[in-house]
Amino acid sequence: MRSPAPDEYQIRTTTLEAFADTILPGEKRSPDDRAVAGVSPGGGAVAAGAVELLEWDATGVSEGLDDFARLLNEHARAYAAEKGLSPEGPAFVTLSFAERTDLVRRLTAPGHPEKAMWISLALFCYMAYDSGAHLDTAEALAAGHPGLTAMGITRPDADGLWRFRKFSYGRALAVPHPNTTPSGSPA
Amino acid sequence: MSHERTDVLVVGSGFGGAITAYHLAAGGAKVVILERGPWLTTTDFEHNFKLGSSYTRAFDFVVGDGMSILGGNCVGGGSVVYFAAMPRAPRFVFERRGSIGRRMWPAAISRDSLDPWYDRVAESISITQQGWEDVSYAGGLWAAACDHAGRTANPVPAAIDTGSCTNCNWMMAGCRFDAKQSLLVNYLPAALAHGAQIRPLHEVQSIARADDGYYRVDYSHVDEEDYRVVTGGGTIEAKIVVLAAGAGATPVILQRSAGTLGDMPHAVGRYFSGNGERLNTAVFNEDRVREVLGLSRDDGLAYAANQIGKGPTVANWDRLDGSLPEYTRFSLEQLYFPPGLGTILAQVADEEGLTWFGPRKKEMLKDWQSWLIIFQMTEDDNEGVFGPPPARGNADRISQQMLGLGRLRYQPTENTWRGWNLADAEVKDILERDGLATVTPWTNDLIGAYTVHPLASCRIGDDPATSALDDRHELRGHPGIFVTDGSAVPAGLTVNPAMTIAALAERAVPGIVEAARARGIDVKYGAPAPDGGTGGRRGVADLLPTLTRS
């Protein structure tokens, strides 16, 4: 696997973080955090581990991350030129949150030739947040994973398995369809 | 060159494969089942979203152009990962004409003539007619909202032992508690007991003709952790081949085999149906649930129970009315969809309209426990077509497990959109009433429409121009090859299809036995249910002469 020079790696990571933050945004990790726009309180996809998940070879996208970041910055430069902006540094990161959003909307719209690629990137950003797909779920919950916690997913029993002893309102809440067979199917 | 030989080779171990394999093995045939996925057992079934857990090992998610398919990928196939809803298809479904201007189902099959086969399945797989005490909070909420809107609602029959079910809602990762009555607890162990062999991680690639009337089946060994990796391969010859690789894979194997087997019927890889499926997400106002519907849980919450349950427990069947025109009939079923696949496609309104990402969507996720997902099963137009097959398998695999890019192209017709729009409006009318919830449909813009019930890509019928199989499930022009999975179902069913796929597989067995006997295989029809029950066998006895040619 290639190891880009440290500054290239930094640019790549910052760019991917900015993409992940556009999908499910979070709060800035520090005052000088450029990747995370800071438009949403609490952790977003970045804090949930989007880059860690993307870098895992199990996803099948890890080898392409350098290219994804470079391409995203190329699109961002073209977007900036179209808007009369002159970005300094990694172009996607220098865009405002609204501009990042607008660009991601274009890249993932039906008909865009690279749509499938950007959607697969977005899918893993989602999975980092809504399921912590790079982490053991019970351990992630115990550690306060931002996505699983925000969604209110409950903790499992001590053996790591979920069981809900109370699960039903326990009473008839509607009248069944008149044409139902004795075995419970539609007639 | 000599190869391993067997009487019957079954490709796939889901409903279509397990049922036929059991009966043929019990009848005396030597049966080998090749399954591309792993062989997981109860203790393998984890409650874990981490890539590489049973949740991703047991699934196949294939993104196509306009339609994506979620299917099983393990011994037991769809029965291991499905939500176990087992309704029979409504009577009008069998009379559907679709886009071909004539009845799509073979004349020999109607609800009445299929009922004895449904009965055989019901004797073999323990199906519970759930009572209201079995219905999850989510199902109860859907029922109460339907009732409030003047609709009916039914607890759904399910292959679940409610006594051992913990309502963990992890059934898509395989049931850790043996509550789900998957094929791992009935047909498959019975097939093994009669000598059938199951070989996991064997992905069939193609079929050719061999000497002495045999078919030669070529397969690859798939790495048990990284399905992108092939570790070898081999060949088996068989007198009878039963294809049951699923509606997303069976036609691909046949397309790839055209060069060696000869021309395929026109309908192979065409007329695919996504069972008209579409999903809506409702986000409930918990206060209104209490005030309008009078619902409250023992712990004081009104609902907030998206995580709790056992998949779908309640469905609305008011629009399953045979007097309505085709493409306007549908069922609406409460469903659980786990995070990972069930969140990205949900939409929320922002300044630009509906969106699937961004700060508003993150806010919507905060209310995840107050979500209720409604699953629409409508009448689509069989408009899916498979392009040329990929080099291997049914998709170009991207991730080590689960995610791949397939060749299915599906452009929904006006008829299909008519059903979806009507169903969207009906869900909105029921759930947005009196401020109960906000409802949005899942977007089709990312991965197209989305089905968990692929059908009809190699279907039965009477018309050779529009059906790949005759009414006994034999592939036209290729005697001795049978197809018994969801691809054989002619069209969308407006309800969950597992029960119908299973009944059709049961019904196909006498014809397969007859074909096997004609090739000198010492096999007979008439095995009891896997647990020894004989009521179902008696029930179909009068139908047997109609299923054999002699």
Image: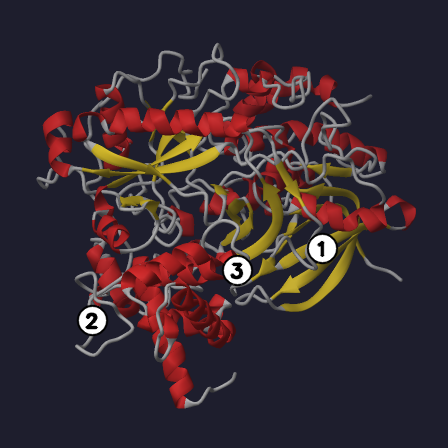
First-in-chain label (2 vs 3):
2
Can the viewer see residue B19?
no
Amino acid at the residue labelled 2: Lys
Q: Chain of mark 3?
A: A
Q: Is residue B141 above or below residue A87?
A: above
Q: Nearer the viewer, mark 2 or mark 1?
A: 2
Foreground residue among B279 and B547: B279
Q: Residue furthest front?
A: A84
In front here: A99 or A44?
A99
Look at mark 1 in the image and give the residue it sits on. B205
Q: Is residue A128 visible?
A: yes
Q: Is residue B220 above or below residue B187?
A: below
Instruction: Report whether B510 appears left or right of B456.
Output: right
The disc label shown at residue A114, or none: 3
Q: Which residue is mark 2?
A: A28
Residue B108, percent from left and from top: 68, 17
| Quadrant for the C terminus of chain B in the image | top right
Q: Nearer the viewer, mark 3 or mark 1?
A: 3
Question: Mark 1 is on which residue type?
Answer: Gln
Residue B120 lies in quadrant = top right
